[in-house]
Image: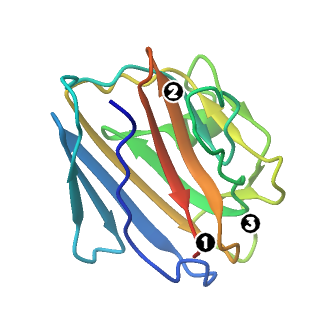
Amino acid sequence: KGPETIFAGSGLNDNEWHTVRVNRRGKTLKLTVDDLQPVEGQMAGDHTQLEFHNVETGIVTEKRFMPAVPSNFIGHLQGLALNGMPYIDLCKNGDIDYCELNAVIGYKSIVADPVTFRSRSSFVTLPTLQAYYSMHLFMQFKTTSPDGLILYNRGDGNDFIVVELVKG
């Protein structure tokens, strides 16, 4: 069946840090923004596993499965962890086999050492993630842009996950 969509948070384009957590177990999705009340949803269909090939932050390069392509993210991404693996840190340190990064590392007025997406053409591409039956995603971001793609991960067939900022 088609993609499942859940929404959480508002007023996130305030240039303050925000924390996003996505948890998935089987068909149950839980989205939490800034430790507020989680929003839950159920995936339709028979699939209980996600198989990812690439994770992209800030931009979507594989657009064929998306009904509408979101605008690219402009802002700061402090960290991205999937199932406890700190992918932005691994990419910055050269500790993973494939990582393409054209965003700026670090920002002088911020202690957190984030990745900065200064334009809509900035992005980070990471290697295949192994997220089958369950997945735990954690990231922090801040932006003044009301809309932007934060994370896109394409898997086998029609499998994908998107985290997007829509109208702040």
Q: Is residue 100 visible?
A: yes
Dot 3, how many residues are within 10 Å of its Cα: few (below 14), some (14-19), or many (20+)? few
Residue 154's label in the rendered image is 2
- Given this view, does label 2 or label 3 mark the residue nearer the observer? 2
Q: State how the image is colored.
A: rainbow
Dot 1, how many residues are within 10 Å of its Cα: few (below 14), some (14-19), or many (20+)? few
- Given this view, does label 2 or label 1 mark the residue nearer the observer? 2
Residue 153 in the figure: left or right of residue 34 = right
Which residue corresponds to the image point at 41% horizontal and 44% vertical from the top-left? 81
Closer to the camera in the image, 19 or 53: 53
Q: From this view, report whether residue 89 is shown above or below residue 39.
A: above
Q: Secondary structure at mark 3?
A: loop
Kindly check if marks 1 and 3 are in contact, taking CB atoms under 8 A apart as contact. no
How far apart in space, not on screen, are marks 1 and 3 (Cα)? Answer: 8 Å
Q: Earlier in the sequence, mark 2 or mark 1?
A: 1
Q: Earlier in the sequence, mark 2 or mark 3?
A: 3
Question: In the rendered view of the protein, which quadrant contains the C terminus?
Answer: bottom right
Q: Secondary structure at mark 2?
A: strand
Which residue corresponds to the image point at 61% horizontal and 34% vertical from the top-left? 91
Q: Secondary structure at mark 1?
A: loop
Q: Position of residue 32 (x, y in %)?
A: 30, 65
Kindly check if marks 2 and 1 are in contact, taking CB atoms under 8 A apart as contact. no
Residue 1 in the figure: left or right of residue 63 = left
Question: In the rendered view of the protein, which quadrant contains the N terminus?
Answer: top left
| Pointer 3 residue | 107
How far apart in space, not on screen, are marks 2 and 1 (Cα)? Answer: 32 Å
Q: Is residue 93 visible?
A: no
Q: Position of residue 48 (x, y in %)?
A: 19, 26
Residue 111's label in the rendered image is 1
Q: Quadrant of residue 98?
A: top right
At label 3, which amino acid type do we have? Tyr
